[in-house]
Image: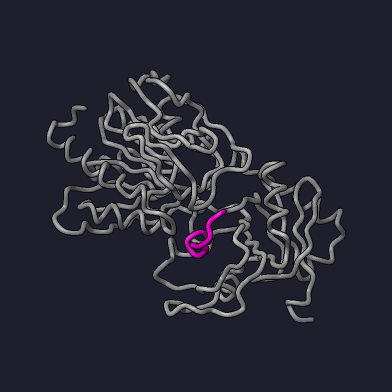
Amino acid sequence: MTALMQPAVLVLEDGTRFRGRPFGALGRTFGEIVFATGMSGYQETLTDPSYAGQIVLMTAPHVGNTGMNDADMESRRIWVSGFIVREPSRVVSNFRAQRSLDDDMLSNDIVGLAGVDTRAITRHIRSKGAMRAGIFSGDDATLTPEEQLEAVRSAPSMSGRNLSNEVSTQQAYVVPAIGDTLGAVAILDLGVKTSTVNYIAERGFDAHVLPQSVTIDEIRALSPVALFYSNGPGDPSASDRHVELLREALREGIPFFGICFGNQLLGRALGFETYKLPFGHRGINQPVLDKATGRVEITSQNHGFAVDAPIDGVLDSPAGFGRVEVSHFSLNDNVVEGLRCLDLNAFSVQYHPEAAAGPHDSNYLFDRFRDMVVATQTTGGRK
């Protein structure tokens, strides 16, 4: 029986089942099922470490027509636990393509599912929330529904899960500054994307990408002009060590910029709580308001957790770091999308200003980061 003729099934934690056909590798895979609303950029999505531990469903009905290439890889490999599309392209038709999507899914051993009603699955997730799921194909598709559901419910939940060690670099490396250097930026790799590192280097910083296990003494040894926390997967409540590391850096006056997971960890370092969103924000069309300018930005996002803080007014940091304000918030559901410290040189956003792939409305944040560091050097660290 050919792969296209073999059965495949998606099984959700609540017992709901969707039958389709295999796509990519055969077998079984488990993860939290989420949907991404981007009409393009599937390669950047697949290779974004923030999607580790998740089965990603694309809401766009036709995926794969531009193929895959080495230039658009956001990390060293595909990270999604599984991939679901309505209709994978049978033909690659882009001059930059080096391989097909199916080729890379097979070489990375990614189990996928095609030929399902992705609209119906998306509506189910929006109604019931993100949940554990499993894709079963090949021999695993012959298991009984009861056996498949038991396997799904035995898989780990995203809540309380720390995935930083799985996605972080194991060895520190440096991307040199473009042009004259302004100094070293210590980048804590919690699942950093290649484009993020390149944008920091383009602003004149030597980008020192560090393992998530780095200590404050190792950071001090670099004499960094700033600290950066990257995007990444998992539950921010399970990253106590990274929170305490950030608190030590803030106490020492090291300027800080964080994105996505880094925004949640800044929130925790300042003393705020985080919580799990029903189905998260994922895609390249998320509207966010910058309160300082009144400008609406269309942003690229991928997060299932958020900072719990009021979006109006000036707040006192519960952890004693002075005044804080929510700088950005979502126009869809008022979720906190950015934090700015008023008594420290520190800020963060919940979305991806590197926008790979996606709109470039928020690319100015890397310039804002550069300006903050330069001003800090001029004033000797005073806010």
Q: Is residue 275 left or right of residue 15?
A: left
Q: Could you say which is closer to the camera, residue 248 or residue 317?
A: 317
Residue 375 percent across, percent down from the top left: 17, 36
Q: Is residue 45 magenta?
A: yes
- Residue at 43%, 23% (x, y): give it: 312
Can I make out residue 172 in this image?
A: yes
Q: Is residue 329 left or right of residue 60?
A: left
Residue 310 percent across, percent down from the top left: 47, 24
Colour treatment of the image: one colour
Within the image, what quadrant is residue 260 found in?
Answer: top left
Residue 62 percent across, percent down from the top left: 60, 67
- The C terminus: image quadrant: top left
- The N terminus: image quadrant: bottom right
- Residue at 52%, 35% (x, y): give it: 306
Q: Could you say which is closer to the camera, residue 123 or residue 383?
A: 123
Instruction: Say above or below: 181 vs 41.
Output: above
Instruction: Say above or below: 354 vs 382.
Output: below
Q: Is residue 180 left or right of residue 253?
A: left
- Residue at 66%, 69% (x, y): give it: 87
Q: Is residue 137 magenta?
A: no
Q: Could you say which is closer to the camera, residue 341 or residue 284?
A: 284
Instruction: Say above or below: 314 vs 366.
Output: above
Residue 222 percent across, percent down from the top left: 24, 45
Within the image, what quadrant is residue 175 found in?
Answer: bottom left
Q: Is residue 227 left or right of residue 114?
A: left
Total residue callouts = 0
- Residue at 41%, 52% (x, y): give it: 192
Can I make out residue 223 in this image?
A: no
Q: Which region shows up in magenta?
A: 37-46
